[in-house]
Amino acid sequence: MNQPYILDLTPGTSLVEGFISNGYDVYLLDWGSPQYEDKDLTLEDYIVDYLQQAVKRALRNSRVSEISMIGYCLGGTLSAIYAALFQESIRNLVLLTTPIDMSRPPVFDKWIQAIQKGELDLNPLIDIWGIIPAEYIKYGIRLVTSPIYFSQYLSLLRQAYETQYVVRWKLFNKWTNDHIPFSGALLRNLLDLVAGNKLINGDLQIKGKSVYLENITANLLVISTSEDRLVPDELSQPIMDKVFVKDKTYKHLKGGHVSLALKGRMPDVLQNWLSDRS
C-alpha cells in the first residue's frame, strides 16, 4: 500500500541507516507498483515469487546460511507466513506493528462483519477494477487515521523556522500522499484472510501448504506501539501464544504506526535484542 522509502527517508530519519550504523548488511524489498497487467498477482505470488526469491538472493549475495527477517505492518504479516513455511533460512524474525489476529479489525470492521455474514460481496467491484487505484488506498487509510487532515500543517507552522524539520516534513508528507495501486487478486485474498481470521486459525494455504504459526522456529521479537490506530497491539500480541520457540519477546512501545521507521536509529529494544542473536 505504501512506498518502501519510509524506511530510508533521509539521513537522520532512516531505519535502514540505523541498521547500517550498527554493522548490519541490509536488503530492502521493494514490492513494486502493480499496474493493470498485475491485477492477478495473489498472496501466493507475493510470498513465493517475491519474498522467497528475495530471501534466496540475499542469502546468496551475503554468502551466509541464515538471515534476520524484519517485517513492517503488512510486510510483517507476509514475513510471518514465510517463516511458518520456509523457516530453515530465518534465524531471527522481527515483526513491527504487524497485524496477525484479525478477529477485531479496527479498519472497516463493519465491512468485514458484513463480508463474514455474506451481506457484502466486493468481488464484482474487484473484477471491474482489476487494480485498486492508489487514490482509493490513500483515502481509505486517511478515513481511519486522519479524517480531518490539517494537524500536520499546524506542526509545520510551529516549526517553520527549523530548516531540517521542514525538509523532513516535506519528505514525510510526500510519502503519506504517495500510495501505490493494489492488486485486485491480492485484495481478494486479504479480505478472505481477514474475514476468516485464517492466519491465527491455521486455515491459510499457500501453494497447497497449510500455514501454521506453530511451525515458526526463528527467534521472535514482536513490537507494537501505543498510538497505532491501524494496527493496535491486540492484532499483534496473539502470535505470542501461537509460536512455541523458547526465545520470543513482545514489546509495547510509545509511538505511532510509522514512528519506529523515523527515529534515525534502531529502537533500543531492537538493537539490544538483535545484537545478542545476530
Image: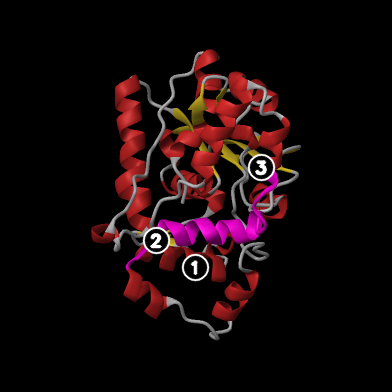
Mark 2 closeness class: few <14, some 14–19, many ≥20 residues within 10 Å: some
| Range covered by the magenta-colored residues | 130-153
The residue located at (41%, 44%) in the rendering is: 86
- Looking at the picture, does residue 167 appear above or below residue 185? above
Q: Sequence order check: which comes first, mark 3 or mark 1?
A: 3
- Is residue 168 shown to the viewer in this render? yes
Q: Looking at this view, is 166 or 137 the one in front? A: 166
**Residue type, label 2:** Pro
Is 74 displayed left or right of 49 in the figure?
A: right
Residue 63 part of the magenta-drawn span? no
- Find residue 101 and report its image quarter: bottom right
Predominant SS of the magenta segment: helix
Residue linked to disc 1: 191
Residue farthest bottom in this picture: 119
Q: Nearer the viewer, mark 2 or mark 1?
A: 2
Q: Residue, x 32% and y 34% (percent of image)?
A: 56
| Residue named by callout 3 | 152
| Circle number at residue 24 | none
* Relative to 58, 195 lies left or right: right
